Amino acid sequence: SNLVVCFGEMLIDFIPTVGGVSLAEAPAFEKAPGGAPANVAVCISKLGGSSAFIGKVGEDEFGRMLADILKKHNVDNSGLRFDHDARTALAFVTLTAEGEREFVFFRNPSADMLLRESELDIELIKKATIFHYGSISLIDEPCRSTQLAAMDIAKRSGSILSYDPNLRLPLWPSEDAARSGIMSVWNLADIIKISEDEISFLIGADDLNDDEVVLKRLFHPNLKLLLVTEGSAGCRYYTKEFKGRVNSIKVKAVDTTGAGDAFTGGILKCLASDGDLYQDEKRLREAIFFANVCAALTVTGKGGIPALPTQDAVQRTLTEVTA
Ligand code: ATP
């Protein structure tokens, strides 16, 4: 059925109505749906693929809004749960004039952290061709154990496990906790997508461009595909058989929010319908280019989910750039 099931957090980002200010200086905030795994699910659906989201929001106005957004985008939200006590997570996010991303999170605890194993839709997980997750949902119990259980169910039923560590350092108790928490599930994944910044955090900045070091530290024996996104430059790939890089396209960057998630959505959409494509370098490079275009188009629009491209938009761009 080519279904991609995305597990983790869905929340509301509050973004200043004017750019380049600190959170304290912001005159007002606009709300935007967010949460990396939810973005990936919406991306896949907008690209014409089949996706579902598993997670928890509050039984409140914001939680219902998020459930509706999934539904509106044809993402199966039957695995979404509503917590009667805790609220939907909120995050206030800004890009300051110095280019620093500043976050203030409201999750003490928020509903997403409270998903219990007994609330998992096991049948939905079993249907997944690909089961995708991040690391934010590994920070706190009970969600951490729930995610490990879901990963186990997915693996046993033959799903491909896809991992985007998506580092959010302020949410972890310490840098060491973040490193060991992210690495604790490393060897279970079939596919890992990581950004250059995250590599430098995990294995040290000096080693960033040394393929030998990246492979030695980050490639585990069962890994099928390691993808390292490099912002406007595109993406590096590593499999057991080959490695290389694929350029992105030149675009006018407006807001990079969601670029990584659009990339992940693009590559998972391709892998869901062609599970062996990583074994054929030509097909793999085509899929990565498709994902780069998805991400590049996302960068040209404001916000995360609103800026994700449709299949038509990606197709048009592919036709233009290959003409
Ligand atoms: P974010 O956390 O902002 O969502 P990220 O740090 O996870 O993103 P990046 O490496 O910045 O990921 O970007 C992911 C992909 O997006 C890149 O591999 C590339 O394909 C595309 N991309 C990002 N920025 C640009 C850009 N300015 N021009 C073209 N493509 C871009």
Image (tube, rainbow, N blue to C red):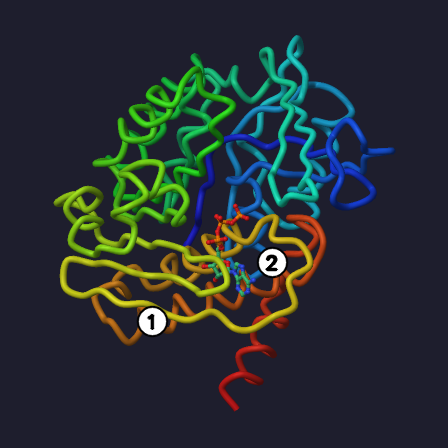
Residue 144 sits in quarter: top left
Between 187 and 233, the one nearer to me in the picture = 233
Q: Residue furthest right?
A: 27
Where is 55 relative to 190, above or below? above
- Between label 2 and label 1, give the one nearer the viewer: 1
Residue 69 sits in quarter: top right
Looking at the rendered image, the quarter that the N terminus falls into is bottom left
Residue 216: x and y, percent? 14, 46
Q: Amino acid at mark 1?
A: Arg
The residue under the point 45% across, 20% down is: 172
Residue 161: x and y, percent? 31, 42
Residue 140: x and y, percent? 44, 15
* Gap in angstroms between the C-alphas marked 2 and 1: 22 Å
Q: Which residue is mark 1?
A: 285
Q: Amino acid at mark 2?
A: Lys
Where is 322 relative to 41, above or below? below
Q: Which residue is mark 2?
A: 46
Where is 305 relative to 248, above or below? above
Q: Secondary structure at mark 2?
A: helix
The residue under the point 32% across, 27% down is: 179
- Precedes in sequence: disc 2 or disc 1: 2
Ligand 1 within 8 angstroms of badge 1 C-beta: no
Between 205 and 114, the one nearer to me in the picture = 205
Residue 120: x and y, percent? 45, 24
Query: Crowding near pointer 2: few (<14 within 10 Å), some, many (20+)?
Result: many
Ligand 1 within 8 angstroms of badge 2 C-beta: no
Total numbered labels: 2
Residue 158 sits in quarter: top left
The residue under the point 44% across, 50% down is: 3
The residue under the point 59% across, 32% down is: 10
